[in-house]
Image: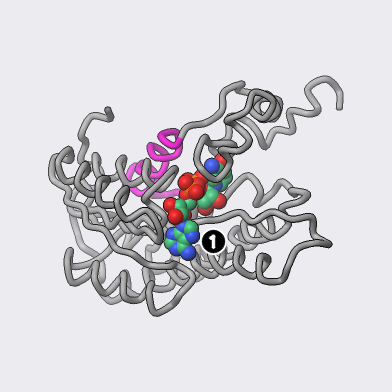
Amino acid sequence: MQKPNRRLENQTCIITGASSGIGKAVAKSMGMEGGNIVVNYNSGKKEAEELAHWISENSDCGQAIVFKCDVSKESEVKAMFKKTIAHFGTVEVCVANAGIQIDHPLHEMPLKDWQKVLDVNLTGQFLCAKESIIEFKRRGMRKGVSKSLGKIIHMSSVHEVIPWAGHANYAASKGGLLMLMESICQEYGPDKIRCNSIAPGAIKTEINKDVWSTKEGAEGMLKLIPYKRIGIPEDIGSVASWLASDESEYINGTTIFVDGGMTCYPGFTTNG
Ligand code: NAD
């Protein structure tokens, strides 16, 4: 287990889609850094409650609460921020992590499945970023807590730059996220708001279990990873905590790829 640390002490962190996978690991890591954690879930109430309990028990100084909300619904996102501010006073960190995949060949993709993925993966991230910025600006700088007014971390994907046949809705949502993140950086950097993305490669979670849980699937994944290891959620959790902390204060408007080298085109290792 990660040693308790204090890099996010007195800071409140909302993590969306935190009842499983990467979001859960980010919430645990930020909790162990002393942050107060809002474990957002849309499904997986029991897992979310167990996680919040674990954080409150194991963190040196942070507490955790759960909040059910569909990030694609504006009224629910607003309610989550309202509850968080009422409970913890404010928000310093938002990790917009919730995401889904609904795959089809493009010519067979129903409009509803295109729309659903865009609604959660892009509009949901916009809504969380918007409410974060409103709260950061309302609250103002808290000297001695963080050098930034607030930190937004978008959970993107290597597919913000790698095209993905059969997954055009997902790749389009993550490509859109790159421009959302960079535009927020440009617009709110002068307010000392930091906005960055993390782009995981292949990480063992529910979203891709059908691939890594079979021998052929896992071997196929490894061919795409120069480091020859499939990632685990904790690989992302530790980076997210560092990116939210003052140790990375001068990082703004960047995507950090956490992918074992997947974006280095391993298919060209033997001359393509
Ligand atoms: P996951 O399926 O375990 O996690 C996704 C979470 O989002 C779930 O807890 C789910 O309940 C939640 N969610 C879905 N719709 C929601 C909604 N409308 N409102 C609130 N929450 C909602 O998979 P994961 O791999 O942990 O995915 C987390 C993020 O990481 C996603 O944005 C995904 O695109 C990204 N990602 C994952 C990988 C990977 O290899 N696992 C790679 C690149 C990017």
- Asked if residue 153 can be seen in this view, the reply is no
Q: Is residue 39 above or below residue 272?
A: below
Between residues 146 and 73, which one lies in front from this camera angle?
A: 73
- Residue at image x 75%, y 63%? 109
Name the image quarter holding the N terminus: top left
For residue 113, side relative to residue 9 (left or right): right
Q: Is residue 4 above or below residue 150?
A: above
- Asked if residue 141 can be seen in this view, the reply is yes
Q: Residue furthest bottom?
A: 75
Q: Is residue 133 above or below residue 246?
A: below
Mark 1 nearby-residue class (10 Å; few <14, some 14–19, many ≥20): many
Residue 75: name its quadrant.
Answer: bottom left
Q: Position of residue 118 (x, y in %)?
A: 61, 66
Identity of the amino acid at label 1?
Met
| Residue under label 1 | 181
For residue 100, side relative to residue 240 (left or right): right
Give the magenta part as a residue range. 233-251
- Residue at image x 56%, y 28%? 230
Name the image quarter holding the C terminus: top right
Between residues 55 and 11, which one lies in front from this camera angle?
A: 55
Magenta stretch contains residue 17: no
Element on which disc 1 rests: helix
- Residue at image x 69%, y 54%? 103
- Residue at image x 41%, y 34%? 234
Q: Position of residue 268 (x, y in %)?
A: 81, 27
